[in-house]
Image: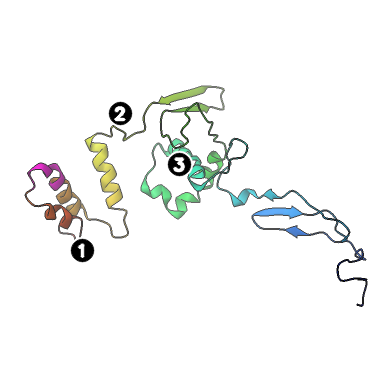
């Protein structure tokens, strides 16, 4: 052997101590390392690496679905609704939405099911000191809180127009008429055919 190593299983202290660091989504720098002992350090997640912050019980990890809750909530507060266009790249990159999402907290209630959609309670603290609250026993669109025909149709038309191959207004109207007369439909194939469209005519 040559150099400053005396055996194959050990090494002498480094002549010049070094630090090890990492950059990117996290920032981390180790303590001074000279080869004689292990070193460790705490990494910090950079604010640009996450869409929003969460307040979760110790031991929990925020999933993409949980983070999405903050963005959707911020969008609803800023615009009054959430639509398909709100998931376009430009909307998802909106700094105003991100800033508000970072101030939203989700607190666990007494419901044992982590997947339960209701009941929910929304509380908002305004800058002037006022506190607003709203209890939601059922989510919009659930049997206990139906959309109603007009809002149902508006949601359908918005979704049908936002697909990779948007459905024309004429094709939408034709499909709505078929569904309205579903009990009198003599052939189910007519309904299936209405979902397969290539032109502006049904």
Residue 48 locus on image (x, y percent): 61, 51
Which sits earlier in the primary sequence, circle 2 or circle 1? 2
Chain part drawn in magenta:
178-185
Q: Residue furthest top?
A: 130
Which sits earlier in the primary sequence, circle 3 or circle 2? 3
Query: 10 Å neighbourhood of mark 2: few (<14), some, or many (≥20)?
Result: few
Residue 41 locus on image (x, y percent): 77, 50
Q: Nearer the viewer, residue 43 or 113?
A: 113
Q: What secondary structure prevails in the magenta region? A: helix
Q: Quadrant of the N terminus?
A: bottom right
Separation (CA) of disc 3 from disc 2: 22 Å
Residue at point 18%, 54% (across, down):
171
Q: Check residue 181 for magenta coloring.
A: yes
Residue 35 locus on image (x, y percent): 87, 61
Which of labels 3 and 2 is toward the front? 2
Query: 10 Å neighbourhood of mark 3: few (<14), some, or many (≥20)?
Result: some
Q: Check residue 5 for magenta coloring.
A: no
Query: 10 Å neighbourhood of mark 1: few (<14), some, or many (≥20)?
Result: few
Query: Viewed as shown, does residue 31 lie left or right of 154?
Result: right
Residue 129 locus on image (x, y percent): 56, 22
Q: Quadrant of the C terminus?
A: bottom left
Q: Which residue is mark 1?
A: 198
Q: Which residue is mark 3?
A: 72
Query: Viewed as shown, does residue 134 lie left or right of 16?
Result: left
Q: Which residue is mark 2?
A: 144
Q: Secondary structure at mark 2?
A: loop
């Amino acid at each position: 052997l040559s150099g400053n190593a005396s055996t194959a299983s050990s090494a002498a202290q480094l002549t010049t101590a070094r630090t090890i660091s990492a950059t990117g989504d996290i920032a981390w720098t180790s303590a001074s390392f000279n080869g004689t002992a292990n070193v460790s350090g705490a990494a910090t997640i950079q604010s640009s690496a996450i869409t929003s912050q969460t307040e979760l019980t110790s031991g929990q990890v925020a999933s993409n679905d949980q983070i999405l809750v903050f963005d959707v909530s911020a969008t609803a507060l800023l615009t009054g609704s959430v639509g398909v266009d709100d998931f376009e790249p430009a909307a998802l990159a909106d700094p105003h939405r991100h800033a508000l999402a970072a101030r939203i907290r989700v607190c666990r209630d007494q419901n044992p099911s982590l997947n339960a959609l209701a009941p929910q309670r929304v509380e908002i603290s305004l800058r002037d000191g006022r506190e607003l609250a709203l209890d939601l026993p059922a989510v919009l669109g659930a049997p206990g809180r139906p959309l109603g025909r007009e809002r149902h149709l508006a949601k359908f038309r918005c979704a049908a127009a936002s697909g990779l191959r948007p459905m024309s207004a004429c094709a939408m109207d034709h499909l709505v008429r078929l569904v309205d007369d579903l009990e009198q439909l003599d052939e189910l194939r007519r309904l299936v055919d209405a979902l397969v469209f290539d032109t502006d005519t049904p």
